[in-house]
Amino acid sequence: MKCLTGAYDNIMLEAKSVITIGKFDALHAGHRRLISKTVELASQNGLSSVLLSIVRSNPIGYLLSFDEKKEILSDTGLDYSMSYHLDDHFASISAEWFIEEILQRRLKCQSVVAGEDFRFGYERRGSVDTLKAAGISVNVIPTVKFDVLPSSSENIRRLVLGCAFDAAATLLGYRYFVSGTVEQGNKLGRKIGFPTVNVLPQAEKLLPPDGVYLTRTITLNGEFKSITNIGKNPTVNGNSRKVETHLLDFDKELYSQQIKIEFFKKIRDEKKFDSINKLKSQIEEDIRKVSQCVNFI
């Protein structure tokens, strides 16, 4: 899969294509159905399969970092992944100009795979009917719903921020995760008998609220039950938000390794303890709770 980013006027495809268009900020179950149909139609007709992602600025954070999104897309069979940033200029172009200049002239689009509520162009005036009127065939994919709740990025973001990870996993089709490179920390955990792995996620990643979580950590050495803390470590006067994970039954170094932390349940809020010994006692209790959870790995 080739990844193309930058201004739309710098991208020109040689081969005719089937395109699916959207934000694709979660690659949830509904998104993957669109992608699967796009790849299928392109393969059947000897065309290139293209995902065109319209990226909006999001101060809350993205459900997938840019690297996480690229990794997931690399296994879908797509020929191209393209990203356009939705700035004021791009938001002002008409649906008709978008079709003529970008879809038809630059991307040589023959067919679009879209969801039921697909809209595009200035003030979202473009629709499936607009595409058809321009001579582009359209395959409409019904919205994926679970217990009447649509699999949408907005719903998933709300569930993650509410720590409803099982429900989020149902809509996503995978367990919500944070990935990143293991960094050197202050080694306080090691000093008190509970070594932690410090992870540096990409800045745009949406993190769950501060607290302590039951998690599964995936490394090159295997998968492990873990306890993950998100927050500033107030007991030792931390001043920056961090992601730290203690892997159960694991004592190897992971520095510079890429790991993935999957979230299952919030155990408790982060709090400031009166002493390191009280923090140690609480961690022992957290580990006891996690050890009793048997059916999530």
Image (spheres, rainbow, N blue to C red):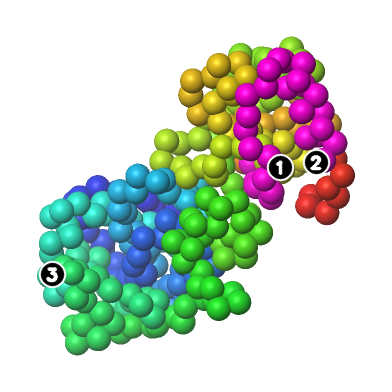
- Tag 2: Cα neighbours inside 10 Å, few (<14), some, or many (≥20)? some
Start and end of the magenta stretch? Answer: 261-289
Identify which amino acid the numbered label 2 is placed on.
Val
Q: Is residue 43 visible?
A: no
Q: Amino acid at mark 1?
A: Ile
Does 286 lie within the magenta span?
yes
Residue 126 image position (x, y, % from top left): 21, 76
**Screen quadrant of the N terminus:** bottom left
Of discs 3 and 1, which sits in the foreground? 1
**Whole-percent x, y for residue 83 in the image:** 31, 54
At a point 30% along the width and 53% down the height, the residue shown is 56
Q: Classify mark 2: helix, strand or loop.
A: helix
Task: Name the front one of labels 2 and 1.
Answer: 1
Marks 3 and 1 in Cβ contact (< 8 Å): no
For marks 2 and 3, the one nearer the N-term is 3
Q: From where the camera sits, is residue 92 visible?
A: yes
Q: How crowded is the residue under tag 3: few (<14 C-alpha within 10 Å), some, or many (20+)? A: some
Q: Position of residue 111 (x, y in %)?
A: 32, 78
> Where on the picture, by quarter, is residue 172?
bottom right
Near-viewer residue (226 or 72): 226
Q: Which mark is residue 290?
A: 2
Q: CA distance from mark 3 to mark 1?
A: 49 Å
| Residue position for label 1 | 267
Q: Earlier in the sequence, mark 2 or mark 1?
A: 1
**Residue 193 percent location from the top left of the image:** 79, 18
The answer to the question of whether label 2 and label 1 lie on touching residues, with beta carbons closer than 8 A, is: yes
Q: Secondary structure at mark 3?
A: loop
Q: Amino acid at mark 3?
A: Ser
Q: Is residue 276 magenta?
A: yes
Q: Mark 3 = which residue?
A: 94
Q: Residues within 10 Å of mark 1 (few under 14, many from 20)?
A: some
